[in-house]
Amino acid sequence: MADRPLPAVSHLKIPDEGDPYLEGSRCGVCGATFLGARHNCSKCGARGKMQTVQLSNKGELYSYCIVHRSFPGIDVPYVSAIVDLEGGGTVKGNLIDVEPDPAKIDFGMPVDVVYDDALGRKDADGNSYLSYFFKPRTQ
Amino acid sequence: MADAYVVGVDMIKFGRFPEKSVPQLGSEAALLALDDCGLTIHDMQALYCGNLGQASGMVGQRILQEIGQTGIPVVNVANACATGATAFREAWASVKADLYDVVLAVGVEQMGRGLLGGGGGSRGISKEGLLGSGTMPSVFAEAGMEHTRQYGTTFEQFAKVSVKNHHHSTMNAKAMYQIETPLETVMNAEMISYPNTKLMCSVNVDGSAAAVIASERKARELGLMDRAIKVRASVLTSDPWQERDLVMPDVNTCTRKAAAAAYEMAGVGPDDIDLIELHDCFATAEILHYENLGLCEDGEAGRLIDDGEVALGGRIPVNVSGGLLSKGHPLGATGIANIYEVSTHLRGAAGQRQVEGARIGLTHVIGLGSACGIHILEKAA
């Protein structure tokens, strides 16, 4: 078992020192942004021109839905959110600290990407995980 | 290239048949389609079989093991919810290319119940409910909410799609359900993923549909032109790159691309279409496709459903079969079942739900991942 939490997804990076962040790749030819590492660009077809980039922890809500029915063991309701990050990259995650009510959620609302334990979920080996969440930004 | 025609087409009544095997279900539709044109399996020169759940299971060959092992080539096709349409298109292409004179396309699926998607059980921990939701109701709710963001489309407007399609299926004995669902019933049904309630999600059913496709020469030789349906366009697209692709499957761009190509191939425009069977896997999706298929300007889809233009008797009836929402959605069969529905109207044989004077119809499916298949059909002259 690892002595510290593992990343919930491979594009979440946990450096030995400093804060966790999301990592992407950007095409050096057309500028398309992707999550995680890759070799080729599926927007323009360029090969071997990908640059690793650290994605922003600031973004805005693009779209969402409110999940009321899920699989056993998953707490509902919750907000499944699509967030456009400043400077490129779109990520999906739970929007927390907001009422799961469409009247309380605004398209385009600014959010911060925050990092926390993966809701207590552990893998078969008992490892803990670090995940990311979106939180409405309070100015 | 000469034209290809649907000469025989049919579907079984969609429902739940756990006691039957997938090949048995597929063979039922195959025999119905053969009967529809008075041919037998011995007349078929190839079989194109669409099935998703047993994609590695040689379903086409096992259908022949049910109805006649004639030694013809069999191609098994899997393309998510575009599987049936893809099998049909491969069959059509083989006749267009003059490889064969008459071939059979079958789509078949046996479904479990419950939520689709949201799995992705790779290493580590489940991401469902941790990094948003990957279930199909959620994915299509988010696609619908994008439309809400852009044009202010309301929960009520999305719900009206379901009211309409459930109403249509009361006139279709082959649909899973024949039940009216008033607006309050739809809106007050269990919320699955806002804005999709349970009645705004397609029904997981077992089903099959099949079509016999012939060259013009063969159709004339067999004396089948009076019932023949001309395939005026067959188009398949995949999803062009979009910036939110990785987290938000885009069902719009591949549909728009396919629609433009199909209208061009058929030499018609949206105004020439008399009825449409489109991919209403969720009520939210149908709204998007009114615009994607050019039935109205962008931003007008909410008005289209409000004004009844897409209901039977309206300007351009959509999903008069009941659609995936009420007829049911057996993934691999859906694309060919759509072709059965449109063909039945073009033959003037749709009974109570007949779109009067229907001359040209369009079918559309989307397989997430993504694939879009569009066919434009016309009654043979």
Image (cartoon, grey):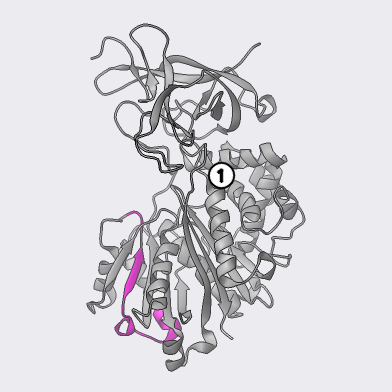
Name the image quarter holding the C terminus of chain B.
Answer: bottom right
Q: Nearer the viewer, residue A72 or B92?
A: B92
Q: Which residue is mark 1?
A: B198
Residue lying at 45% horizontally and 82% vertically, measured from the top left = B36
Dividing the picture into quarters, in which one does residue A131 lie? Answer: top left
Rendering coords of residue B122 (x, y %): 31, 33
Rendering coords of residue A19 (x, y %): 42, 10
Q: Residue furthest front?
A: A29
> Mark 1 — on which chain does it sit?
B
In this rendering, is residue A84 above or below B284? above
In this rendering, is residue B112 above or below B259? above
The reply, left or right, for residue B183 in relation to residue B378 is: right
In this rendering, is residue B49 above or below A138? below
Q: Residue furthest right?
A: B307
Write the start and end of the magenta stretch as one range.
B34-53
In this rendering, is residue B335 above or below B306? below
Residue kind at label 1, given as amino acid type: Lys
Residue lying at 54% horizontally and 33% vertically, measured from the top left = A68
Residue lying at 30% horizontally and 67% vertically, measured from the top left = B75
The reply, left or right, for residue B47 in relation to residue A42 is: left
Rendering coords of residue B273 (x, y %): 65, 69
The reply, left or right, for residue B112 in relation to residue B378 is: left
Verify whether residue B338 appears in magenta. Answer: no
The answer to whether residue B20 shows anywhere in this view is: no
Verify whether residue B43 appears in magenta. Answer: yes
Label 1 crowding class (10 Å Cα cut-off): few <14, some 14-19, many 20+? many
Name the image quarter holding the N terminus of chain B.
Answer: bottom left
Rendering coords of residue B275 (x, y %): 64, 68
Residue lying at 29% horizontally and 84% vertically, measured from the top left = B42
The reply, left or right, for residue B219 in relation to residue A108 is: left
